[in-house]
Amino acid sequence: MIEMRDVAFGYRGGGDLLHDISLSLPRGSFHFLTGPSGSGKTTFLRLCIADLLPTAGKLVAFGQDVAGLGRDAIASLRRRVGVVQQDAQFLDHLPVAENIALPMVLSGEPVDMQAIRDLLAWVQMTGHARALPPALSGGERQRAALARAVILSPDLILADEPTGNLDWDMSMRLLQLLVELNRSGKTVLVATHDLNLIRAAKQQVSARVLRIAGGRLQSAGAEL
């Protein structure tokens, strides 16, 4: 699904932040990505969706070498990926249900209200469909963000520190939703510094733990 072969990336004038990255994210797998702040976890996720392109090496996404893709092809690729950020951004003047529908609107697809209702029920937010984002708690915002991320039924879910602003109970609820997505066949990659979250996943999912250190990607241990 995502393959990197000797990939490197550096911001202009700053040298390589990441180098010699080789890995495969196969369909239906679950991965945690760890590493200290500033190590390149977010940069790595941006490479996965071709928001950044490698400065060296080869990146293949869904069978396509991203180096040869034009703007429309990259946009099509990104529709196969759902992204959840630590600080989920919404249009505050639109109700939650309409925020969740935005990926459909932006991709030119008809808005499927039944799919939105089903997702709201899945994330246990049926009663918040008409609420405005500023009225949501941190946990509710993250669950709404996850619903929005999967509204187009993506093959790959990327979550960048999705529990960083949540208490433990909310973190576990969000983790359970990610596990359910994985069990339905989705590939999931969660960037986190929270080792307790990874340990808590042990009873629910078989996951590979990856660590970025010194610009390189390392396996952080056996299957959870």
Image: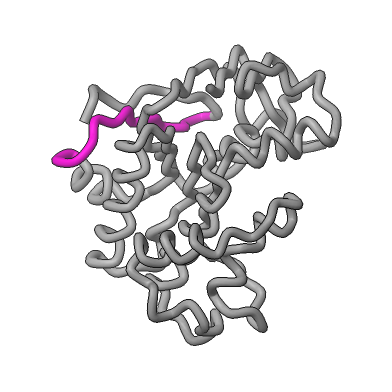
Front-most of 139 and 94?
94
Coloration mode: one colour
Rendered residue at 69%/28% (across/down): 9
Quarter of image, res 204? top left
Quarter of image, res 219? top left
Q: Quadrant of the C terminus?
A: top left
| Left-right relation of 152 to 188 | right
The x, y position of residue 57, in whole percent, is: 69, 14
The x, y position of residue 5, in whole percent, is: 60, 13
Residue 160, compared with residue 1, is above or below; it is below
Front-most of 216 and 7?
7
Rendered residue at 49%/86% (across/down): 135
Give the total of numbered labels: 0
The x, y position of residue 66, in whole percent, is: 73, 23
Residue 43, compared with residue 98, is above or below; it is above
Residue 145 in sight here: no
The magenta stretch spans which residues? 202-214
The x, y position of residue 147, in whole percent, is: 47, 59
Magenta-span inclusion, residue 34: no
Rendered residue at 52%/82% (across/down): 130
Rendered residue at 73%/50% (across/down): 107
Q: Work out which residue is located at the far left of the displayed protein and give it.
A: 203
Quarter of image, res 16? top right
Residue 123 in sight here: yes
Magenta-span inclusion, residue 212: yes
Front-most of 214 and 177?
177
